[in-house]
Amino acid sequence: MIKLPHNVAFLDIGTNSIRLLIVRIHLNHSVSILTQQKEVVRLGEGEFTDRTLKPEAMQRAILVCQKFREMAQSRNADEIIAVATSATREASNQKEFLKLLKEKAHLNVHAISGKEEARLIYLGVASGLNLGDQQVLFIDIGGGSTELIIGGQQQYVDMESLHLGAIRLAGTISLPNRNGMVDPKDYDHIREVVKLRIKPAIKRLKSYKVDMAIGSSGTIINLAEISSRMFNKRPLQPADLMKADDLITTIQILCSRDLEERRLVPGINPERADIII
């Protein structure tokens, strides 16, 4: 039995970024957040053409994991739970990377399946919302994969983890060099690639009644932030909704800018400028 209060650190080693969450579980089993951190490492950069994590990408991830482990120790974490997602689970050199994390960052990291990733996304998002009796499509666009979950407040009914993600698409779809600008023809090509890969999952999930869609990833949240700055003239608020037409217009504007201009768009995370489309 775990002795309370109990401090736990969670590490999420993703394809684009690594996240740290440290919480305290109190005597009454309530939970308070001690700190949340995130650093972009681009672990999956260059991986998806040959399924191999690159040495420089692994080194970036290891350095951040070392830093986060030290941070967890400074917060008196009694336990560190570390998982890795798409980039790691698909890598041919996964064992090498996990061994390096053990040796250099002193972390035991578990590469979780796509379905387990989807399940954890659902639990994390649904637990923080009041959905009532609504059935929701949860969408999480990561660096290497996209998770789709149908569920309500208490349980999910279906889920899918797709080999689609911001870094994966940026690294595997070849577009003409226009300094980051994406013309309508190129954007249509990207859409066709995505539609082809997502079609079987959408066909199955369309059989469920859905009252609303909720996005939880950095990509979706950043698009919503940009959209809010454009159309609401203010930063994104927790209860905000993003209209489909506003999203389409936002993407069209982002496509029309070269990379340097895109980095200056109000609300954008400059580190996402090259992969947000």
Image (cartoon, rainbow, N blue to C red):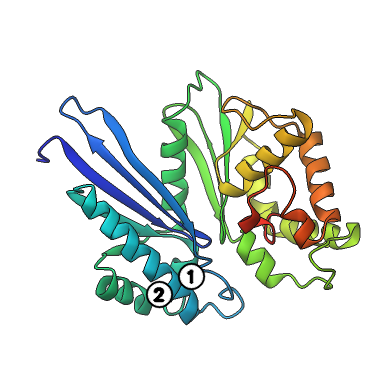
Q: Which residue is mark 2?
A: 94
205 relative to 232 in the view: left or right: left
Q: Does residue 273 appear in the picture of this structure?
A: yes
Q: Nearer the viewer, residue 166 or 146?
A: 166
Q: Residue at x 74, y 51 (%)?
A: 264
- Residue at image position (60%, 28%) is 237
The picture places residue 121, in percent across and down from the top left corner, at: 46, 43
Q: CA distance from mark 1 to mark 2?
A: 7 Å
Q: Position of residue 93 (x, y in %)?
A: 42, 79
Q: Secondary structure at mark 2?
A: helix
Is residue 237 depicted above or below 222 in this figure? above
At mark 1, the secondary structure is loop
Report whether 238 appears left or right of 254. Answer: left
Q: Circle 1 sits on which residue?
A: 90
Q: Amino acid at mark 1?
A: Glu
Number of residues whose C-alpha sits closer than 10 Å to that of mark 2, classed few (under 14), some (14–19) or many (20 or more) = some
Left/right of residue 154 with respect to residue 6 in the rendered view: right
Judge by depth and name the residue closer to the eye, 274 or 183: 274
Compared across the picture, whether 59 is left or right of 161 comes to left
Going by the numbered disc 2, the residue's amino acid type is Gln
The residue shown at (26%, 64%) is 108
Can you give x and y, in whole percent of width and height, for residue 257 in the image?
Answer: 83, 56
Quadrant of the rendered structure where residue 220 is? top right
Query: Residue 65's spot in the image, x, y percent?
Result: 35, 63
Q: Is residue 50 above or below residue 266?
A: below
Badge 1 vs badge 2, beta-carbon distance below 8 Å = yes
